[in-house]
Amino acid sequence: LIWLYGMAGVGKSAIVFTIAERMRGLKVTEQTSVEKQLRGTFFFLHKYMKCCMTGYFFVTLVYQFATNSPSIWKDVNRAIRDNPTLLDPDKSLCDQMEALFLQPLQNLQLKLCGCLPLTFVIDALDE
């Protein structure tokens, strides 16, 4: 976990965006023993409230993650098929986190023996 903090307007979001863009380009090579690929991003921006609502937080991260990681796609699909209301932005964040994020991650960890670092970039969580 890297926590970037500072006064408003000093460039934290610009730094986080740059980190996310650079991480998007990282790929696994034969020389690297771990995957460093970016799994998902979410930017809370008060000027774009509709698309950055808290209710879309886990749904957005899970969509990006599942799109880039077919190994969890089945678990996410199953969770949504069993409870389609998980996609509702008014659904409890705890319910979304548990069903869409934590359960698939736990299953992935079991499949991969916990050896895969997962990177998510989140900005302006306090907005």
Image (spheres, rainbow, N blue to C red):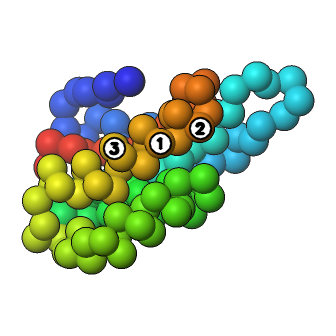
User: Label 2 belongs to which residue?
Assistant: 111
Q: Say which residue appears at 52% left-offset and 33% top-offset.
A: 110
Asked which secondary structure carries label 3, the reply is: helix
Residue closer to the observer: 71 or 118: 71
Instruction: Specify whether residue 49 is in view.
Output: no
Q: Which mark is residue 102?
A: 3
Category of crowding for the residue at label 1, using alpha-carbon neighbours closer than 10 angstroms: few (below 14), some (14–19), many (at least 20)? some
Question: Is residue 91 found left or right of 28 in the rendered image?
Answer: left
Q: Position of residue 34 (x, y in %)?
A: 69, 26
Residue closer to the observer: 94 or 112: 112
Q: Say which residue appears at 79% left-offset and 24% top-offset.
A: 32
Q: Is residue 108 above or below residue 70?
A: above
Asked which secondary structure carries label 1, the reply is: helix
Category of crowding for the residue at label 2, using alpha-carbon neighbours closer than 10 angstroms: few (below 14), some (14–19), many (at least 20)? few
Residue closer to the observer: 8 or 123: 123
Q: CA distance from mark 2 to mark 1?
A: 6 Å
Q: Position of residue 12 (x, y in %)?
A: 34, 37
Q: Amino acid at mark 3?
A: Leu
Q: Position of residue 73 (x, y in %)?
A: 53, 61
User: Label 1 belongs to which residue?
Assistant: 107
